Image (cartoon, rainbow, N blue to C red):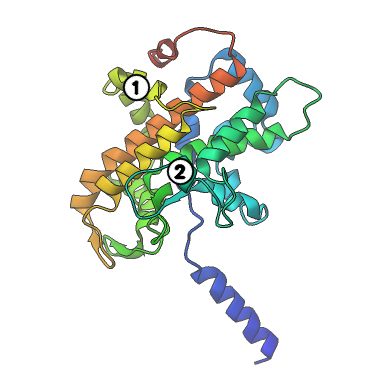
Amino acid sequence: MSFLFLLQILVLCLIFSAPSTTDAWGKEGHFMVCKIAEKYFSEKTKEAVQDLLPEIANGDLASVCSWPDEVRFRYRWSSPLHYINTPGVCNYLYSRDCHNPKGQQGMCVVGAINNYTNQLYNYGDSKYTYNLTESLMFLSHFVGDVHQPLHVGFEADEGGNTIIVHWYRRKTNLHHVWDVSMIETAMKDFYDNDLNTMIDAIKLNITEDWSDELNKWENCQNKRATCANDYASESIKLSCSYAYKDVEQDSTLQDDYFYSRYPVVEKQIAKAGVRLAIILNHIFDAGTSYKMSSLFLQKE
Ligand SMILES: [Zn+2]
């Protein structure tokens, strides 16, 4: 066997065994967030989004909502924008926690949401040279990420990436359980493996079970460019009280964990979708003073 061949095998092994610190909500999670958001776009927002989407999207924002995960190695600077680490505490502080590993302030998921929101406010200004197509895809993705509780997790375990667990019988890590495994199990157990059925069920919950909470989802106390600081605070609290709770290295997580945590997953996906719509309607349709709640209550 030649040295080169051995080297190739070694490289392949490294690629496939690398811990997946890179995941966000999996593809399904991001697709659902953006599909839910689309339902609450005003007419003007729909037009602007259509105008900005790249051709490969075929007119569907949801189809490109995972794009930032695909480019995070090409755009290396963007990798820290998918998450926030706290120093092992159950609260989040922008000044303490929103930075990349080099310590550059604002280089975290909250900073990214604020930054891409600000960029998109320049839509329609022909002198503005940023690539707003990418801004839209980044913003839509990061609003999803900040709602995955473990995207605001502890530095020491990289948001649960280094906590190895068994999801039923399969070995994985805690971060992946929240990105992907719980959604997959729910799809299989509750929704006949059909993503659209799952999306419809979440939309129905928004107009029915959660309708009296929409006001709270829409507003925030700590508003700067967006409410993203509050979204991050919610996520670290959920990480502590649900995701990390009663989990250790090598824990086996099954029905007890799934049934008590999965409702959090569904609600976070719903919140992310609704809030993405709120942000984009503010950006592209600021002149309209309708209450978002009137859009939420539209029936199918
Ligand atoms: Zn991400």
State whether label 2 is within 8 Å of ligand 1: no
Rendering quarter of residue 122: top right
Mark 1–mark 2 distance (CA, rounded to whole Å): 26 Å
In the picture of the structure, the residue carrying the numbered disc 2 is: 28
Question: Of tags 1 and 2, which is closer to the observer?
Answer: 1
Residue at (73, 20) in percent of width and height:
124
In the picture of the structure, the residue carrying the numbered disc 1 is: 216
Q: Position of residue 253 (x, y in %)?
A: 24, 58
Relative to 12, is 184 above or below?
A: above
Residue at the farthest front position: 95
The amino acid type, in three-letter code, at marker 1 is Lys
The amino acid type, in three-letter code, at marker 2 is Glu
Assess disc 1: are there few (<14), some (14-19) or many (≥20) residues with their C-alpha within 10 Å of its C-alpha. Answer: few
Q: Quadrant of the N terminus?
A: bottom right
Q: Position of residue 229 (x, y in %)?
A: 45, 35
Rendering quarter of residue 280: top right
- Of residue 98 and residue 217, the one placed in the foreground of this image is 98
Left or right of 100, for residue 200? left
Name the N-terminal-most of marks 1 and 2: 2
Q: Which mark is residue 175?
A: none
